[in-house]
């Protein structure tokens, strides 16, 4: 039903993850309103009503709600030349909760407890380069330049390319991984070829944490958080971290100043003054 829209998104160079998310949410919403009703034929009042219902019935999280509204707005505009105003349904930004940060020792423990060569290489690459999960999945062998010690991240979030330094330790690990697995195009491929799936990658991390004694509330994205926090604690300039992470603004990178404990450790408790 949304094949033409999917093709349009590919032509406009939306990321594969965004395309999957938008088309999936549109299909899900279409199923919700019923096969005898088409999204673009609903008048504004009934469209808003149905969106409201699906958000509440399915208890959509903040991000999913935003993605659904963005997908619907883009679909109506591009495929039906219809401007839609969903401002009344835009969720307020959630209260910022600082994520749990893995220490250097905890990251090492997770990697050491991961014996599968491929799984270890994937998790190590995310931490070593500070990648988003989608960036790892899209990473191709051709994007690794060992002679220049650079890794190229193509069309990442915001459709931006960036270059990252290629650590020697990671290079050695990937050489060993390549010898045993021989990927063809993507650095990490699924069992039937093609890129590894996001769900499988999350499962790899979840199982890795289970094998440790770590009780923190962490996800795969915690490796990226750890990368940035550990760099900041080692004295790396915030602007450089911004560039490495691919953040559009320094404001996003500033989050990590709240996560590092280096400056806090320098503060003396008033108890010391007694």
Image (cartoon, rainbow, N blue to C red):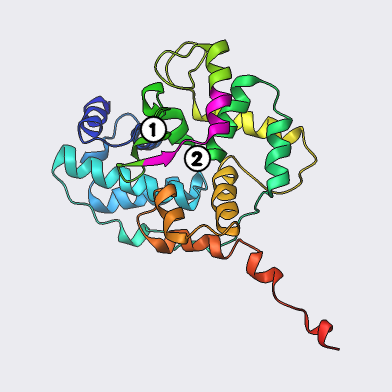
Q: Which residues are magenta?
A: 163-174
Residue at left 40%, top 62%?
250
Tell me where residue 251 sits by quadrant: bottom left
Rounded to the nearest angstrom, the CA distance separating label 2 from label 1 is: 16 Å
Asked whether 170 or 102 is in front, the reply is: 170
Task: Classify mark 1: helix, strand or loop.
Answer: loop
Residue 169 is a magenta residue: yes
Q: Quadrant of the C terminus?
A: bottom right
- Which residue is identified by label 2? 129
Residue 34 vertical placement versus 82 (above, below): above
Tell me where residue 3 sits by quadrant: top left
Counting residues from the start of the chain, the first of labels 2 and 1 encountered is 2
- Which residue is identified by label 1? 148
- In the shown orientation, is residue 172 left or right of residue 183? right
Would you say residue 135 is visible in this rendering? yes
Question: Where's residue 80, x and y in %?
Answer: 15, 40
Neighbour tally class for label 2: few under 14, some 14-19, many 20 plus, Cα within 10 Å:
many
Question: Where's residue 138, x and y in %?
Answer: 40, 29
Question: Where's residue 115, x and y in %?
Answer: 70, 23
Asked whether 26 or 224 is in front, the reply is: 224
Extreme-right residue of the structure: 274
Task: Classify mark 2: helix, strand or loop.
Answer: helix
Question: Where's residue 143, x and y in %?
Answer: 37, 28
């Amino acid at each position: 039903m949304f094949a033409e829209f999917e093709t349009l998104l590919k032509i406009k160079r939306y990321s594969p993850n965004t395309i999957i998310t938008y088309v999936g949410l549109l299909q899900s919403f279409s199923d919700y309103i019923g096969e005898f009703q088409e999204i673009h034929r609903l008048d504004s009042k009934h469209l808003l009503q149905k969106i409201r219902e699906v958000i509440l019935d399915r208890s959509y999280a903040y991000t999913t709600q935003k993605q659904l509204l963005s997908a619907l707005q883009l679909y109506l505009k591009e495929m039906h030349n219809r401007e839609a105003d969903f401002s009344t349904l835009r969720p307020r930004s959630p209260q910022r909760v600082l994520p749990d940060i893995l220490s250097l020792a905890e990251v090492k423990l997770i990697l050491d407890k991961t014996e599968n060569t491929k799984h270890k290489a994937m998790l190590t690459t995310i931490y070593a380069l500070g990648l988003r999960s989608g960036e790892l999945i899209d990473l191709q062998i051709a994007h690794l330049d060992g002679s220049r010690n650079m890794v190229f991240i193509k069309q990442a979030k915001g459709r931006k390319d960036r270059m990252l330094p290629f650590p020697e330790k990671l290079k050695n690990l990937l050489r060993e991984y390549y010898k045993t697995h021989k990927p063809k195009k993507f650095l990490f491929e699924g069992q039937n070829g093609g890129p590894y799936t996001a769900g499988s990658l999350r499962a790899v991390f979840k199982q890795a944490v289970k094998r440790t004694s770590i009780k923190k509330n962490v996800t795969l994205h915690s490796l990226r958080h750890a990368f940035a926090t550990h760099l900041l604690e080692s004295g790396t300039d915030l602007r450089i971290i911004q560039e490495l992470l691919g953040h559009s603004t320094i404001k996003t990178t500033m989050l990590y100043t709240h996560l590092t404990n280096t400056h806090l450790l320098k503060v003396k408790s008033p108890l010391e003054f007694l």
